[in-house]
Image: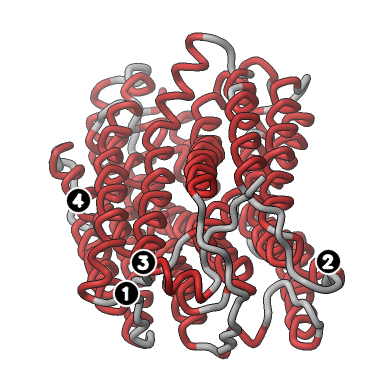
Amino acid sequence: MENTKQAAAPLPSSDSGNKRGLLIIGLLIAMLFAALDGTIVGTAMPTIIREMGGLELMAWLTTAYMLTSTTIVPIAGKLADLLGRKLVYVSGIIIFIIGSALCGLAGNIEQLIIFRAIQGLGGGIMMPMAMIIIGDLFTGKQRAKWQGVFAAVFGLSSVLGPQVGGWIVDAWDWRWVFYINLPVGILATILIAISLSGKKAEGPVKFDWPGIFTMVIGVVSLLLGLSLGGSEFDWLSWQIIGLFVLAIVSLTVFVRIEATTEEPILPVKLFKDRTFTMINGIGFFMSLGMFGAIMFVPLFMQWIVGISASESGTVMMPMMISMMIFSVIGGQVVYKIGVRLQLAIGMIVVAAAFFLLTTLDASTAKLTASSFMVILGIGIGLVMPLLTLVLQESYPKSQLGVVTSSSTFFRQIGGTFGMTLLGAVMNMQSSSHLKERLVPLLGQLPEEAKQFADQTSATVASNPQAVYSTLLDPKMLTQFPKELTDKMVPVVKSTLIDSLHTVFWVGLVFILIGTVLTLLLRNVKLVQQTKEEKAAAGTEPQVNHM
């Protein structure tokens, strides 16, 4: 592992201390409003579609943002090492602000999708940059504390997003979901611009254009295949197979380029280091499994337990709160129990939460489901901040951008795989169970219900979740005779419960794989450095002394 020593930095003056405070405030503001945008827009989507139309394109409002934000992450990390944090971060915020303004001005759904992609570029640059700069500002225990705080802010945005989005849509207009980013983004830009230095790597800057080109094609093809497969196109269609083949070819060429180029976007030699590989593997598998809970627990609570969408949000809130608390606690405890032990404990707690989710049934109370989510949040909180912290403590500042952004990148890729794979498991199990249990029952319905029976039977194979949304929606059920619903609803509920249990079991398998990886991790030692040691190591904050 490379361990180059950085040039010593001067001890901070009181002026630089003030600027560091401004910088942290700017980072927190930028992190909050960028993370909020990931959840706040979802609340406004029904209103946007009602006004603009284009229901068939609605998913692209999320997909376009996800494609660009995920793809740009490793590029942003490398550029931050080459060009300096300030130029890259401020550029990302400005792109995000411009994208937000354009989204608010969009005249149709197609324009909005394009502008969401632009916004995603800015968001993808911003998300890892905050963690990179925290890695610059602090070392040791202080770095752990602030990584936990920023992880907590990210969790807070997940709690606030839907509520804030709903309030803005009800009080003003859906366009203000995007316009609200402008004043907040401008404030964050000013604070960061005046307090962060523009220092960059010494010597000529060499961009890895072939690496950037092949990585973009490979990642975009992979994400498109995962997003469109099973929804827009059949998994075995030529379109999806073609996307996956293009992804494999492009990423293979990318790896070959990265092995020989002078300034690689993602140095292949990093994967030879067990710490780098295991940490990113843990993040990948935890994100892959974690999305099972985030996606399907609200669905379970709405369709099985029978609570409203807003009430199901309150079931998820305890997870976010416990995650926030233990993100901060975990940053302190790790110095007493060690990295490997804390990661193992956190992953075991997450696995225990997934096992508890497999026990959910129609009689489950909201309080019980919330307690399971609290356990899940505790586990995530113990693990998430460490994934970035360990990489930052293991590599020199010259590689801080690359290794930090890699952590974000693999977690985002894992989340995308999770949504796709667990969604596919859900649909396959649902279709199989519905064919076995519901279709024979539909054939026994009276003649006057024959058209409904035929339509429902056809939907079972193509879109089983549509069957759930129809037969488990109290408003829809009022349109059918009671004797009809009394026969079908118990069957549909049992089918959904069994399908979701399978999803949670599969998610648990991914979590257990991540747990095994913690046992293969070297016992990384984190040391709290004194101010003098930090100055000697050149790890004092890069703040302007203007």
Q: Are marks 1 and 2 in contact (CB under 8 Å)?
A: no
Residue that appears at 78% across and 19% down? 107
Q: Position of residue 397 (x, y in %)?
A: 59, 72
Query: Which amino acid type is marked by label 1?
Result: Leu
Q: Amino acid at mark 4?
A: Phe
Numbered disc in front, either 3 or 4: 4
- Counting residues from the start of the chain, the first of labels 1 and 2 encountered is 2
Q: Which three-letter amino acid code belongs to the residue tagged 2? A: Phe
Give the labeled residue for mark 2: 213
Query: What's under tag 3, amino acid-wise?
Result: Val
Lateral position of residue 387 relative to residue 341, left or right: right
- To which residue does mark 1 refer? 512
Cα distance in 3D space between marks 2 and 4 = 44 Å
Badge nearest the viewer, 1 or 2: 2
Could you tell whether 68 is left or right of 518 in the image? right
* Secondary structure at numbered mark 4: helix
Where does label 4 land, which residue? 372
Residue 53 position (above or below residue 170): below
Mark 2 residue element: helix
